[in-house]
Image (cartoon, helix red, strand yellow):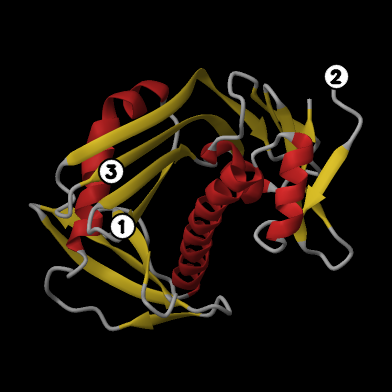
């Protein structure tokens, strides 16, 4: 089924080695590294949310319900993550909690202004994308994760992927990307990938799992994010496309690295 050679590499660390491997294998390393860079940022977004939720839980604070139904994250110029919980209503976002997480994963709370949040455009971009996705979300009945980031030109990007479900099932098979204007109120462009159905795996019984992306020639952003996000929950995750198989291994120091194999 597969060719008999593997080619290993540590992402974004050895570009000369990666270039040589690309020539031998035909695998588009530059494309993969570019997409993995985005996937890594999305994973960090999730980490910021996880640690902020843990912090608020320990403080006895609520993160859902009528008071704080909405949230978003962003990084400042010092790469500090900001996580803001609040409520978007009547074209305003009123913050309730404002947390920051540094590079050591330490979380602390900042004083919240009583007025509308200055970062309202992030919340508005999320709301616009959520409204666009609502017919599909209401139909499939799955929980989705939304991520927002401000682009260098002032526009916003919103990514949408199926998340971990309340019963612990992890889902893949669809991914949606929106570009919005600087106000966050108008969608300028949208792209999506959907396999026709969503598939999932239970995390209750960890085992090797395979993500079927054989309708594509190369790994998608959603597939790469799935592997990187849930690598600790399964012994091995294989991302199989029409031309390759990708997976993540751990070295003797506990660091993860990608492995690719041509089919």
Residue picked out by circle 1: 151
Relative to 91, say whether 193 is above or below.
above
Q: Are marks 2 and 3 in contact (CB under 8 Å)?
A: no
Q: Are marks 2 and 1 in contact (CB under 8 Å)?
A: no
Relative to 171, say whether 94 is above or below.
below
In the figure, is residue 120 to the left or right of 194? left
Residue picked out by circle 2: 1
**Mark earlier in primary sequence (2, 1):** 2
What is the x, y in percent for residue 72?
A: 34, 59
Labelled disc at residue 179:
3
Q: Are marks 3 and 1 in contact (CB under 8 Å)?
A: yes
In the figure, is residue 39 to the left or right of 21? left
Residue 179 figure quarter: top left
Can you name the residue that lies furthest to the top here?
196
What is the x, y in percent for residue 129?
A: 26, 40
Relative to 255, say whether 241 is above or below.
above
Relative to 179, say whether 17 is above or below.
below
């Amino acid at each position: 089924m597969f060719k008999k050679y593997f080619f290993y590499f540590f992402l974004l660390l050895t570009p000369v080695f990666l270039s040589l491997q690309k020539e031998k294998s035909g695998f588009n390393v530059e494309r993969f590294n570019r997409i993995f860079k985005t996937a890594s940022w999305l994973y960090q977004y999730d980490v910021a949310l996880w640690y902020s939720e843990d912090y608020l839980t320990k403080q006895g604070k609520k993160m859902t319900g009528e008071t704080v139904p909405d949230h978003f994250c962003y990084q400042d110029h010092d790469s500090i993550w900001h996580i803001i919980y609040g409520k978007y209503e009547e074209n305003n976002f009123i913050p309730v909690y404002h947390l920051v997480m540094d590079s050591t994963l330490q979380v602390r709370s900042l004083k919240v202004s009583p007025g509308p949040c200055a970062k309202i455009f992030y919340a508005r971009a999320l709301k616009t994308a959520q409204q666009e996705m609502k017919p599909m979300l209401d139909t499939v009945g799955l929980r989705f994760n939304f991520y927002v980031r401000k682009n260098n030109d002032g526009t916003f990007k919103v990514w949408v992927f199926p998340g971990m479900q309340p019963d612990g099932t992890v889902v893949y098979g669809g991914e949606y990307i929106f570009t919005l204007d600087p106000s966050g109120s108008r969608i300028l462009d949208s792209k999506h990938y959907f396999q026709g159905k969503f598939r999932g795996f239970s995390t209750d019984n960890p085992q090797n799992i395979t993500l079927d992306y054989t309708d594509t020639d190369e790994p998608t952003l959603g597939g790469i994010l799935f592997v990187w996000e849930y690598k600790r929950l399964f012994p091995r995750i294989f991302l199989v496309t029409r031309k390759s198989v990708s997976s993540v291994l751990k070295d003797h120091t506990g660091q993860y690295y990608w492995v690719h194999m041509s089919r």
